[in-house]
Amino acid sequence: MPLISSLWEAKANRSFEYSCLRPAWGRGSCVTSGGSRDVARAGPPKMAVCIAVIAKNYPLYIRSTPTENELKFHYMVHTSLDVVDEKISAMGKALLDQRELYLGLLYRTEDYKVYGYITNSKVKFVMMVDSSNTALRDNEICSMFRKLHNSYTDVMCNPFYNPGDRIQSRAFDNMVTSMMIQVC
């Protein structure tokens, strides 16, 4: 069974050692070098640090972690809307004909990468990922957006939801939380 290292840990007066190993294809619990199953002490790695759902330039849902950078994330989400509009106008009718909803990497800062997705009804999804996270590939981000879109569709199908109101669904929030924290 092939194993990859997910976390190196340095201890005082010792060399580096594996503290957590997991199967390359699975997301089960960690197997430490001693053979017991533990979760890494450093905490789970973050997949996304901010996820936003925007309709007509007003937010329906924004969730970010850590919360001390919340204002910074809100600013980055709103600045990314200009990039989304530029990408849509550059692609023009070809975007609508191909039904390609994933916009890809919108822009990169020193700390974060910002990705975009747009639905057929012009609702925009924005996701920020930590730049140091090299484990996430483009196809994984695209599948995360598809899951987000499916969950958003479930919210819209709720007969008690008024379109245009903030999203306050527990199921949607749990799905976003699962995207934000990856269990080792």
Image: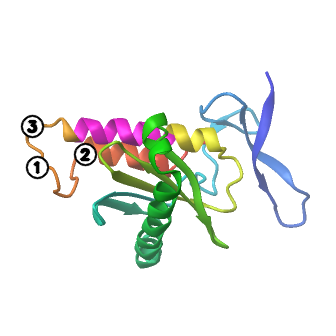
Which disc number belongs to residue 162? 1
Helix, strand or loop under label 2: helix
Cβ–Cβ under 8 Å for marks 2 and 1: no
Q: Amino acid at mark 3?
A: Pro
Instruction: Say if the magenta span includes residue 17.
Output: no
Q: Amino acid at mark 2?
A: Arg
Q: In front: 19, or 77?
A: 77
The residue to which callout 2 is attached is 170
Residue 31 located left or right of residue 62: right
The residue to which callout 3 is attached is 159
Q: What are the residue bounds of the magenta stretch?
A: 144-155
Could you tell me which quadrant the C terminus lies in? top right
Q: In the orientation shown, which residue stands out farthest toward the top?
A: 1
Mark 1 and mark 3: Cα distance apart in space: 8 Å
Residue at horizontal 49 percent and vertical 35 percent from the top: 98
Instruction: Say if the magenta span includes residue 146.
Output: yes
Could you tell me which quadrant the N terminus lies in? top right
Mark 2 and mark 1: Cα distance apart in space: 16 Å
Q: Amino acid at mark 1?
A: Asn
Residue at horizontal 41 percent and vertical 71 percent from the top: 78
